[in-house]
Amino acid sequence: MADTVRYTVDHGEIRRWVERRGGRPATVGGVSRRRRASSLRIDFPEYRIKAALKPITWDEFFHAFDAAHWGFLYQEETGPGRLSRFYRFVRRDHEAAAMR
């Protein structure tokens, strides 16, 4: 049975989840001065779209993530022992409302 979807804003938890799956922080088109998080992505090597994604540092990633008030939805496993790469960025206020 697949894991349920979880939610966090904890930087360490997000980074551990991404790195355990071989992912790295990335953006589509770079991070602007305004630090728009709409272009944030996780670059997984097996799903790489080399022309579209640009690597960024974790500091840049989390600065944009926090500035946009994102939350991180993710799944640990798709089945017993099978790591999931499912994730979504959601507005923090959206998640808070859904949890009420």
Image (spheres, helix red, strand yellow):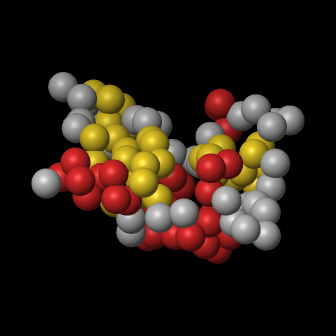
Q: Is residue 23 visible?
A: yes
Q: Residue at x 75, y 45 (%)?
A: 28
Examine the image and state in which quarter residue 81 appears: top left
Looking at the image, the residue that sits furthest to the right is 51
53 over 55 or under it: above or below? above
Q: Is residue 13 visible?
A: no
How many numbered marks does the figure carry?
0
Q: Residue at x 80, y 55 (%)?
A: 30
Examine the image and state in which quarter residue 64 appears: bottom right
Q: Pinpoint residue 73: horizontal percent, then vertical percent.
A: 37, 47
Left or right: where 50 falls relative to 91: right
47 over 58 or under it: above or below? above
Q: Nearer the viewer, residue 70 or 57?
A: 70
Looking at the image, the residue that sits furthest to the left is 100
Q: Nearer the viewer, residue 56 or 78?
A: 56
> In which quadrant will I find the N terminus?
top left
Q: Pinpoint residue 39: horizontal percent, then vertical percent.
A: 67, 48
Q: Residue at x 46, y 69 (%)?
A: 11
Q: Nearer the viewer, residue 78 or 11?
A: 11
Q: Pinpoint residue 51: horizontal percent, then vertical percent.
A: 86, 35
Q: Residue at x 28, y 48 (%)?
A: 6
Examine the image and state in which quarter residue 25 appears: bottom right
Q: Nearer the viewer, residue 100 or 88?
A: 100
Q: Pinpoint residue 83: horizontal percent, then vertical percent.
A: 39, 37
Left or right: where 10 falls relative to 69: left
> In which quadrant will I find the C terminus?
bottom left
